[in-house]
Amino acid sequence: MAIAESFALTRVTTVGDYFALLKPRVMSLVIFTGLAGIVVAPGYVHPLTAFTALLCIAVAAGASGALNMAYDSDIDVLMSRTATRPIPLGHIARDDAMAFGWSLAVLSVAVMWLFVNTLAATLLAFTVFVYIGVYTLWLKRRTPQNIVIGGLSGALPPAIGWAAVTGHLSLAPIVLVAIIFMWTPPHFWALSLWRSEDYARAGVPMLPVVKGKPSTRRHILAYTLLLAPLGVLPAFIGLGGVLYLAVSSFMGAWMLLEAFKTWREKDAVKEPAARRLFGVSLLYVFVPFAVLIAEHLLHLPPLWT
Amino acid sequence: MSDDDEKRAAKERRKRNIVLAISLGALAILFYLMSVVQWREHFG
């Protein structure tokens, strides 16, 4: 980590720098899917307990983001997408980011354990472990399967939300986790198609760098083919209603269409199809989960009981 | 470092301290409220 340690501070660290370390956009996804887990779970939980659970999920996600930026600062400086992060810019010291990240991680798990329940706290600690220990420190620089396995970390929030309410797990939260788990690879591989030079420069073995773009396109299509039917499954296990079935079917078909276009793409420089797929994949998580939350808040009946 | 830079740095440090104080205060309030909720769930 000699390179990372050599970043000299260019100015005093601001509150905004600490906020940027939390990866707020990733955090918003995690909060949203965690909220879905809380809302769709059966049973009652005090609203303040639900808020505390959601806060812990958000803070742990932010802590993971900060730790990821600290451990990866030596390669972040080499990639245009990440070179403007606070550590490569010299806006915050790597050690400070590390201390900030670990403090928030320990605090979020401890508060979850104290005020929510042991299972939710254990799952939360597991997400931090997968993101930092498994993905960032172990797999990211070693295998193109890095985001497949590391994606489990970002997929777990619905299960944590569910566990916060019920104290146990069942098939329903596992299906929600499986949807996000299966969604993660096509989402990041689409990004990596037009960022492959960045990853190659930093020595990160993303799929287009190691196996080439045609193989990546096939992988994207294969994962999306598995994702589309998985996405409608909540309607058949008592979680989603008619509206969820309609929206998730439409979104699944749209994402499949974009994955197909990405598979057929000829422009390997600008990668317009991959860029569209990336945008649609963001909607794919937000829209059906929003419908799921709305159906439960409005007490609409599930399709299957 | 010029006077302006030092003033800006001092202002940023003050802002950081205020945000830290507010965060810790909010955490203390959360601890208190959650203790009340848990107390009521067990004994209320």
Image (cartoon, helix red, strand yellow):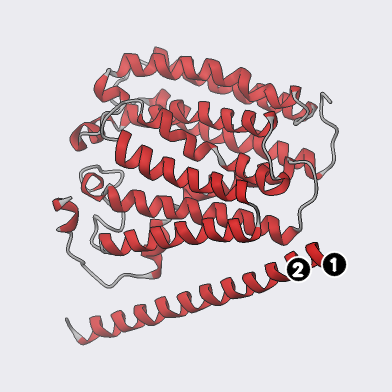
Q: Is residue A136 visible?
A: yes
Residue A35's spot in the image, x, y percent? 65, 47
User: What's the amino acid at mark 2?
Assistant: Trp
Q: CA distance from mark 1 to mark 2?
A: 7 Å
Q: Nearer the viewer, residue A235 or A161?
A: A161
Quarter of the image with the C terminus of chain A in it: top right
Q: Residue at x 14, y 52 (%)?
A: A2
A172 horizontally vs A279: left or right:
right
Q: Is residue A276 visible?
A: no
Which quadrant of the structure image shows residue A5? bottom left
Q: Are marks 1 and 2 in contact (CB under 8 Å)?
A: yes
Q: Nearer the viewer, residue A304 or B10?
A: A304
Task: Using the image, name the chain to which the residue with label 1 belongs.
Answer: B
Task: Using the image, name the chain to which the residue with label 2 belongs.
Answer: B
A169 horizontally vs A81: left or right:
right
Element under disc 2: helix
User: What's the amino acid at mark 1?
Assistant: Gly
Residue A117's spot in the image, x, y percent? 65, 52
Residue A293's spot in the image, x, y percent? 72, 41
Which quadrant of the structure image shows residue A18? bottom left
Q: Residue at x 33, y 41 (%)?
A: A136
A219 horizontally vs B23: left or right:
left
Compare marks 1 and 2 and give the one earlier in the sequence.
2
- Check disc 1: other Cα within 10 Å, few if <14, some if 14-19, many if 20+: few
- Check disc 2: other Cα within 10 Å, few if <14, some if 14-19, many if 20+: few
Q: Which residue is mark 2?
A: B39
> Which residue is outermost to the front?
B43
Q: Which residue is mark 1?
A: B44
Which quadrant of the structure image shows residue A101? bottom left
Relative to A25, say whether A96 is above or below. Answer: below
